């Protein structure tokens, strides 16, 4: 079988590879002529990631409309030895959903069927192309909620969030996407279909593949449908934005209120440089006259108004400076805007290097205290902007300034994370961006086991080649 048609770090490939005419004929017969795109004007949006840092040229973009069509496409590509890049809403941040140069992009946007919510099991079945907002709206209409929540909810899709095991703002209470997936339908590289969609609370009949596919970044199978576990609705919310002296003070506050707040839903942290950027790009004003060492956004949610619960807990907390408290929806959205607008403001400022990391909570203060200086030493003129999910130890280190292929700052940040016992990826995945540094937080035995699984399910290596593991000849700065 021919080798997959992708290699190297081709971020600037301009020539469009051609698929064999016989294969094109077969693919058009499967998905229809209008869903096989090879015109540059039509394929461009599929070939560049959300950050604009990673891009390549696809031999074609295919838009199947069913699991059966996905299976037929993969079967044909498998037999022809053509590499395939699965793509959801293309909101990924590590280059894992766009071509390197020559692959077929398999857009799952048309798999957008959302079945009726099952109120007895509190579950819903969604196609891979359904947006997170659509799932949330359907759950809300049924008196439930889908608690996987992230700023890109309007465009992020069910398939994409499963592929990256996305977390978002409410992991502290509900866990990441993997904990919401109770069944999947997926297509393997050779076109075989695996369907485990019963949503059973107990099923101990062998390996749980739906959990394996969550976080696999499209390297093991293409998820086409999923059975999702919903949660009881929490319509009453109270939100507070607090100014504290440092990350250490924020963690002390978290420790204090964790035992008092039965309805704690989210604890987010961000800093002055991020607020300044958000205000510049949104035209808003800073929440406090004097910037604190750390901003802390705390939200409680329940069936009854948690305002008194939150206010009482915060009154007894030492070290809180300025604060803002919101109980109605408009006020809450205004406070959340300071946090959620970080991503769009950073992207408006330039092409960022986005480093999504997790650390033990006890190591967060040391990391935050030194990471900016480490970045400045490695890449003079670089601008690090930090924010993230304090409650689960996840910080997003965004670096503006370095060229797209300048990984000096990436190297020092990820090495610092590893030295403190953390992980180089919390919820964005490894993609292409972090493949050279995988060994920092995964042992040789870990990586060998993961490669064995990849080889077993995708022996020809046609699914998302280079993602997670990299390819021969890739940049290897992380091996120094």
Image (cartoon, rainbow, N blue to C red):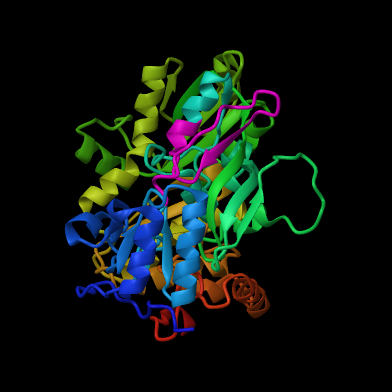
Q: Which residues are magenta?
A: 108-135
> Total label count?
0
Side of 283 where 70 appears, left or right: right
Looking at the image, can residue 238 be seen?
yes
Q: Position of residue 250 (x, y in %)?
A: 52, 41
x 42%, y 72%: residue = 83
- Judging depth in this view, the residue of 62 and 426 nearest the camera is 62
Q: Position of residue 6 (x, y in %)?
A: 38, 77
| Vertical arrangement, residue 450 with respect to residue 382, above or below | below
x 52%, y 19%: residue = 141
Main secondary structure type of the part rendered in magenta: loop
Q: Is residue 56 magenta?
A: no
Residue 144 is drawn in which quadrant?
top right
Q: Position of residue 473 (x, y in %)?
A: 40, 86
Q: Is residue 117 magenta?
A: yes
Looking at the image, can residue 272 be seen?
no
Q: Position of residue 194 (x, y in %)?
A: 64, 56
| Vertical arrangement, residue 347 with respect to residue 40, above or below | above
């Amino acid at each position: 079988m021919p080798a997959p048609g992708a290699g190297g770090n081709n971020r600037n490939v301009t020539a469009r590879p051609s698929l064999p005419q016989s294969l094109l004929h077969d693919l058009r017969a499967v998905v229809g002529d209008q869903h096989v795109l090879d015109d540059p004007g039509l394929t461009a949006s599929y070939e560049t990631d959300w950050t604009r840092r990673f891009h390549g040229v696809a031999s074609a973009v295919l838009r199947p409309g069913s699991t059966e069509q996905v299976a037929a496409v993969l079967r044909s590509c498998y037999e022809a030895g053509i590499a395939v890049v699965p793509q959801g809403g293309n909101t990924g941040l590590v280059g894992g959903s766009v071509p390197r140069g020559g692959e077929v992009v398999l857009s799952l946007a048309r798999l957008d069927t959302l079945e009726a919510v099952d109120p007895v099991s509190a579950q819903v079945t969604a196609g891979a192309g359904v947006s997170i907002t659509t799932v949330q709206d359907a759950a809300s209409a049924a008196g439930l909620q889908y608690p996987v929540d992230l700023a890109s909810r309007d465009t992020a899709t069910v398939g994409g969030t499963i592929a990256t095991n996305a977390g978002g703002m409410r992991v502290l209470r509900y866990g990441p996407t993997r904990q919401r997936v109770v069944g999947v339908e997926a297509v393997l590289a050779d076109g075989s279909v695996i369907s485990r969609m019963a949503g059973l609370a107990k099923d101990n009949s062998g390996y749980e593949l739906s959990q394996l596919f969550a976080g696999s970044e499209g390297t093991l199978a293409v998820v086409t449908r999923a059975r999702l576990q919903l949660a009881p609705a929490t319509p009453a919310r109270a939100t507070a934005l607090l100014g504290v002296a440092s990350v250490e003070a924020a963690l002390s506050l978290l420790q204090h209120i964790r035992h008092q707040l039965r309805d704690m839903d989210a604890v987010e942290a961000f800093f002055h440089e991020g607020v300044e950027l958000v205000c510049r790009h949104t035209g808003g004003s800073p929440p406090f006259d004097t910037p604190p060492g750390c901003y802390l956004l705390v939200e409680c949610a329940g069936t009854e108004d948690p305002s008194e619960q939150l206010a009482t807990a915060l009154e007894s907390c030492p070290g809180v400076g300025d604060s803002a408290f919101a109980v109605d929806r408009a006020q809450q959205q205004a406070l959340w805007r300071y946090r959620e607008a970080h991503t769009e403001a950073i992207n408006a400022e330039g092409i960022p290097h986005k480093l999504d990391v997790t650390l033990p909570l006890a190591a967060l203060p040391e990391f935050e205290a030194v990471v900016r200086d480490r970045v400045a030493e490695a890449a003079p003129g670089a601008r690090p902007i930090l924010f993230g999910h304090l409650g689960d130890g996840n910080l997003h280190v965004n670096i503006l300034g370095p060229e797209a292929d300048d990984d000096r700052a990436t190297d020092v940040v990820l090495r610092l994370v590893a030295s403190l016992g953390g992980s180089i990826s919390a919820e964005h995945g490894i993609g292409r961006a972090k493949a050279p540094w995988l060994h920092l937080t995964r042992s040789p035995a870990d990586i060998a086991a993961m490669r064995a699984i990849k080889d077993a399910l995708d022996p020809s290596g046609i699914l998302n080649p280079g993602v997670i593991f990299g390819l021969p000849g890739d940049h290897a700065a992380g091996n120094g």
